[in-house]
Amino acid sequence: RDLEAMRDQFAGRPDQARYDARLAETKQQLEEGQTMHLQFDCALREPRLVSEALQYYRLVAVWLMRIVATNGDYEKGNGYTFASIKEDAFPETCPAAFACLPEYVVEDLVEFMLYISRYAPETLDHEPLDEIMNFFITFMGNADFVKNPYLRCKFVEVLRCWIPDEHGHISQKLLSLFEVNPISLTNLVPGLLRLYVGIEFTGAHNQFYEKFNVRYQIGELCEYLWTVGAHKKAWIALANSDPEFYTKFLNMLINDAIYLLDEAMKELPKVREIETDMEDQEGWAARPQQERQEREAEFRQTRRLLRSNLSLAMVHIRMMSYTSRDIAHPFLRPEMVERVAAMLNYFLLFLAGPERRRLKIKNPEKFGWDPKELLGMIFDVYLQIYAADSAKVFVAAIAADGRSYRDDVMVETARVVRSLTMKSERDVAQFESLTTEVRERASEDEEEEADLGEIPDDFLDPILSTLMRDPVKLPSGHSCDRSTITRHLLSDETDPFSRQPLTVDQLVTDDELRENIERFIAERKALAKENNDAMHT
């Protein structure tokens, strides 16, 4: 297509004949390649070949699992069943018999399953798949046994092909793998979430961008699994039993959502600007041809990026929306609540603030851009965290966000949601109650800031320059607020001052500094009260 689009550039030029010959040659090569591709497809999808290959790879999966289940003594594995191995029963170290196997043993299995799942899914109805399913689940989130993260990501690609499509269609055979298989019901969600966290650092130069593709597929899998009662129960159990891990997962989920939505918000005005320029046909035609070609190329690239970023971001925001109803407590942890509030305020400013008209584009559905749906999900997250906020830490975090919190934006949000009948009147009233509480808390914070006046440098967090409330000592000798350093450790387990390895259990409460800060606050508030009383007498 790109070669044909260059036809006008060669028309009437001396090298037009060479261009025409090259175009014809390319078309012939493309046709021959397509013919060969179809021939290979016919041979590879032959039912008997597929059936025998599936039986073979089932045996490979059983053999690999037996090596692990018997800690390398797989020849003694008579009577072994999949139900006898659990994640907590894994050997502490990878058996040498398993570690010495070449990677292609697993890669061949997953590549075959991926090909069949994409191009001949009907053949999967005729063979048992539980052994292969259990193999994927067992090793998906286990980096000690399958170290290559890209190989484990392919497990997710296969499973993504097995869940119901956009129309809800799925075979009963595949449905049973997700909704009946006992190992799936207990271990699939933990495996997916551990892979989500583990893919953050792969060591590749482009690891930052590559992680989004697999996390998108994990997000789609999780959205389906949340609708299955047993998987939802396993998800909630993981959040309750391992809060440190789940907080790390939530931090990465929020990081991705912020980056992807922020990029999309930057690209929407660019698309709108170019669309406006192209609507003026006379003005567009009057521009130099090279300028038009450059702008059109920029437009195509921006549209691709916008579509990609929006589709990835919506999966992340949707996950926060449906999980925060039943798992709200991680959002309220000291190291998370301020970040969650800042994220919600930031995107609410885009969606309901004065700049929202800049986000309107033609045919938004082509890009997956639905501001009404996004606003509804952000609205839900606000309400669901607010409902669990008995200590009012979420209210305080919203009010303390000096970058994006705007009372008028929250008021406008309630008005828009009510006028579009997006939510029930009860939900809108609850959001208005949140708005009122935040407004009152913001006013109290302003008064306290005025009362405290200038704060001594020793009492300020060295990272954020905010007043410390719960100071802790680091091995490097510095003191930080506990919530600040804990949030830092979620993404980078090093001391920010010495760059040495650091974990939460190495933090030591700085009681002396905390007492000095509390004494300073009490004295300043008492002095402010005296001055205020004196002014009114």
Image (tube, grey):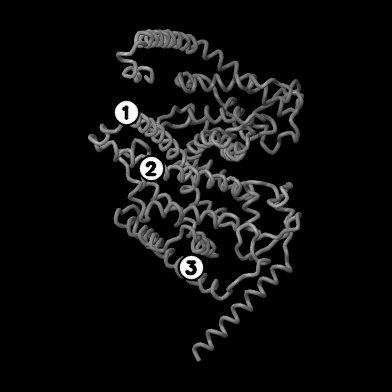
Which quadrant of the structure image shows residue 233?
A: top right
Q: Is residue 156 left or right of residue 514?
A: left
Determine crowd level at label 3: few under 14, some 14-19, many 20+ residues with C-alpha closer than 10 A: many
> Looking at the picture, does residue 267 appear above or below residue 27?
below
Q: Position of residue 78 (x, y in %)?
A: 72, 22
Tell me which amino acid carries mark 2: Leu
Number of callouts? 3
The residue that label 1 is drawn on is 289
Residue at image x 71%, y 68%?
513
Contact flag, marks 1 and 3 (Cβ < 8 Å): no
Determine crowd level at label 2: few under 14, some 14-19, many 20+ residues with C-alpha closer than 10 A: many
Q: Is residue 172 left or right of residue 423?
A: right
Q: Is residue 436 left or right of residue 340?
A: left
Q: Position of residue 158 (x, y in %)?
A: 52, 27
Nearest the eye: 193 or 176 = 193
Q: Is residue 462 left or right of residue 336?
A: right
Q: Which mark is residue 377?
A: none
Tell me which amino acid carries mark 3: Ala
Contact flag, marks 3 and 2 (Cβ < 8 Å): no
The residue that label 2 is drawn on is 268
Label 2 secondary element: helix
Q: Quick one: which residue is furthest to the bottom in this view? A: 537
